[in-house]
Image (cartoon, rainbow, N blue to C red):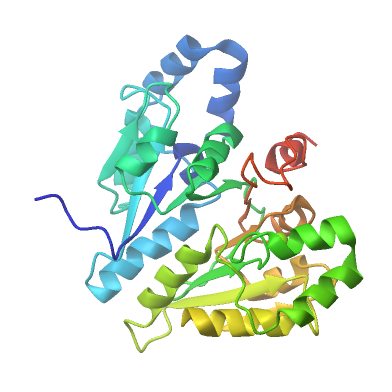
Amino acid sequence: MPPDLTDTLVIGISSRALFDLERENKIFEQEGLDAYARYQTDNESRVLEPGTAFALVEAFLKLNEKLGEHLVEVVIMSQNNPQTGLRVMNSIDFYNLGITRAAFSGGQSLGPYLEAYCVDLYLSKNPEDVQEAVDHGIAAAQLYAPPEAFNPEADEIRIAFDGDAVLFSEESEIIYKQQGLDAFLEHEKIFADLPLPEGPFGRVLKTLSRIKSLSAEPLVRIALVTARDRPAHERVILTLRSWGVTVDEAYFLGGLSKNQVLKAFNAHIFFDDQDKHAGPASEHVPSARVPYRTTSELFDKDAPGPDSRNQE
Ligand SMILES: [Mg+2]
């Protein structure tokens, strides 16, 4: 019988998100697949350095051990072929990461495979793969380069989410963008009692909240970091209440920059739909941008993101 993953948080992660493969990626981009394959085989026994999502993955796998339950499943989702993927698997062994499932698609797009592996959360550095996952309705985000100095909490996983267009739907964000702040505030006041619809990461928050409730010990700490402020905060609080989830911390910043709050919170990862928030935060904590669906009114294929920053 196949394993039942309904109550498990399944994280699909690209090899470049887990390990630092930037040099290797450059060889691939500049010299082609053959040169890349040769390099990877020649260096098969050289252990890869941690990448942007390494600390998060390591912390989640430790959580499984602590609770003695398989609550989080991490799957490597890579466009490598099985040959070039061997170096990644060797590095997983070296760091003793409890990752058993892997998909090496040999250059094929990964979108159709995410559903086959029941992926709930997909993290990658490849914008096309992330966009495809988002368009398939999967919570997905493109990672920025890792922060230079990051010292994660050892005993607790800390995850920070933006509100609009991440935990919540983009409905209010569209009003803000198209009609301005006053119209947004008016709208939020009128609908304060009506819970916000679930956004792309709503289900991930609900699953994390369930995992949190399994232990009296504080193992997972969740922060909401939003540009909303009073009076637009009320609808957020009532929405979370209606979902039956609690967050440990909430920051209503009203336009103040988010990066200092994230630095203080010391998130293992921060998710935001806008580069203007996630980009500066990525200098302090691992961060990722959540793109809009291609059918969204907010979709802009030229919107700045991790790639534009990494090229600076
Ligand atoms: Mg937002």
Find residue 67 and report its horizontal and vertical position in percent.
Answer: 27, 75
> Between residues 209 and 48, which one lies in front from this camera angle?
209
Using residue 18 as the reference point, say whether residue 82 is left or right of it.
Answer: left
> Seen from this angle, which residue lies furthest bottom?
216
Using residue 70 as the reference point, say whether residue 14 is left or right of it.
Answer: right
Total numbered labels placed on residues in the image: 0
Using residue 178 as the reference point, say whether residue 18 is left or right of it.
Answer: left
Q: Residue at x 20, y 58 (%)?
A: 4
Residue 260's image quarter?
bottom right
Q: Residue at x 80, y 79 (%)?
A: 229
Residue 239's image quarter?
bottom right
Find residue 295 and report its horizontal and vertical position in percent.
Answer: 64, 41
Find residue 83 and report its horizontal and vertical position in percent.
Answer: 32, 21
Placement of the C terminus among the 4 image quadrants: top right
Q: Quadrant of ligand 1?
A: bottom right
> Seen from this angle, which residue lies furthest left?
1
Note whether residue 125 is visible.
Answer: no
> Between residues 131 and 90, which one lies in front from this camera angle?
131
Q: Is residue 68 above or below residue 214?
A: above
> Between residues 242 and 133, which one lies in front from this camera angle?
242
Note whether residue 305 is visible.
Answer: yes
Using residue 211 as the reference point, say whether residue 301 is left or right of it.
Answer: right
Q: Residue at x 36, y 26 (%)?
A: 105
Q: Is residue 42 above or below residue 203?
A: above
> Seen from this angle, which residue lies furthest front?
190
Find residue 165 and report its horizontal and vertical position in percent.
Answer: 66, 59
Q: Residue at x 79, y 74 (%)?
A: 187
